Image: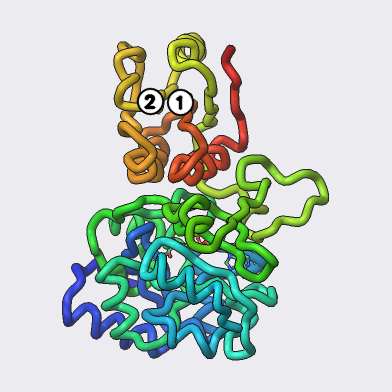
Amino acid sequence: MQTRLCPIGEESLKDAARIIASGGLVAFPTETVYGLGGNGLDAKAVLSIFAAKERPADNPLILHIRDVSQALPLCEWTEQAGILARAFWPGPMTMLLKKKPAVPDEVTAGLPSVALRIPGHPSALAFLEAVGLPVAAPSANRSGRPSPTLARHVFEDMQGRVPLILDGGACAFGVESTVVDMTGSAPLILRPGAVTCEQIAMVLGECGVADSVMRPLRDGEAAPSPGMRHRHYAPRAEMTLYEGEPEKVAAAIRAACEKESGACVFALTDHLDRYKGLNVRDMGKDAAEAAHRLFYLLRDMDDENIRYIHSETLPPTGLGLAVMNRMARAAAFRTVAVS
Ligand code: TXA
Ligand code: MG
């Protein structure tokens, strides 16, 4: 299959709508990461998304919709969902709600809940408008690779597997949406993202974070979200995170790098000076910049055949929690506490 990479415009959107209507797949930009979309009401199209990504069949997909009216036939809508939707949609938040029978079991991997999101990127909304159907879309990477934040990343992973990639430039946030489970007695974050726990608690009065967000699952422990069972966002290099006082972290990282060849350091902008003479990458000055750069940096590590990554960490609050959740998984939870 030939893969076309096209800027978003009237013609490419018409093509995209035609492809989705006939059961095919189109990759499209969102404000978080690129998605790999197919008709969310067509079980065959949904199965072909799993095949193109080589995604395990037990990991359910998000349905992308353009407005709340499109959600009503898909789920049991609630008053609380309405409050969150008014506060954060269109935007980087996905809600889990009880599913209705219109949603194929292939989308939800047989689970009784369905994940819904109205993305905030104008091109994503134009795409959903042109398609006129709920679009099932996971991140457009091959399974186990970092999520794509540029159309070029999608091309690297999906060339020959999808007919069309819509190019909308770099994604604004760079980490995937917040997944919040609205099926329990209180909202519970299963995957942290740009909409924070603090923000959700502000509008709903309370919000929890699943405690497996920052640690590996224990033997036999049930995953609150199937996505947590799989090792995501993994670079080929062995990644280690360092926590502690910045001067001491820098000394520990320097000592580790001196013992290895093929090592690279991820450091915050203000700390770059401490890593002179080493192969160092700038993570940015804060959590927002780190979110924007992380997946891009991880892909670079693969391209450059880096064997070890030693990384500074951020406080796990606000958007920092989303960044640390992705980094902890990329590092297979290998963390050194420096004292
Ligand atoms: O920002 C995003 O959310 C991007 C863009 C394309 O919208 N999409 C994305 O999709 O990251 P994906 O498939 O890579 O991640 C969806 C996550 C997975 O961890 C999955 O397990 C979880 O949401 N999920 C989806 N449906 C679920 C359900 N019914 N119950 C529990 N978890 C669910
Ligand atoms: Mg993904």
Nearest the eye: 5 or 284 = 284
Residue 172 spot, x, y in % from top left:
29, 54
Q: Name the residue under label 1.
A: 312
What residue is drawn where x is 17% and y is 81%? 10
Residue 40 spot, x, y in % from top left:
49, 82
What residue is drawn where x is 33% and y is 67%? 120
Identified by mark 1, the residue type is Glu
Q: Is residue 332 left or right of residue 313?
A: right
Are the residues flagged by discs 2 and 1 in contact, CB closer than 8 Å?
A: yes
Q: Quadrant of residue 117?
A: bottom left
Nearest the eye: 58 or 130 = 130
Identified by mark 2, the residue type is Ala
Residue 338 position (above or below residue 233) = above
Nearest the eye: 185 or 261 = 185
- Quarter that holds the N terminus: bottom left
Residue 71 spot, x, y in % from top left:
49, 83
Check disc 1: other Cα within 10 Å, few if <14, some if 14-19, many if 20+: some
Q: Name the residue under label 2.
A: 267
What residue is drawn where x is 35% and y is 33%? 283
Whether residue 50 is visible, yes or no, is no
Disc 2, SS: strand
What residue is drawn where x is 64% and y is 81%? 105
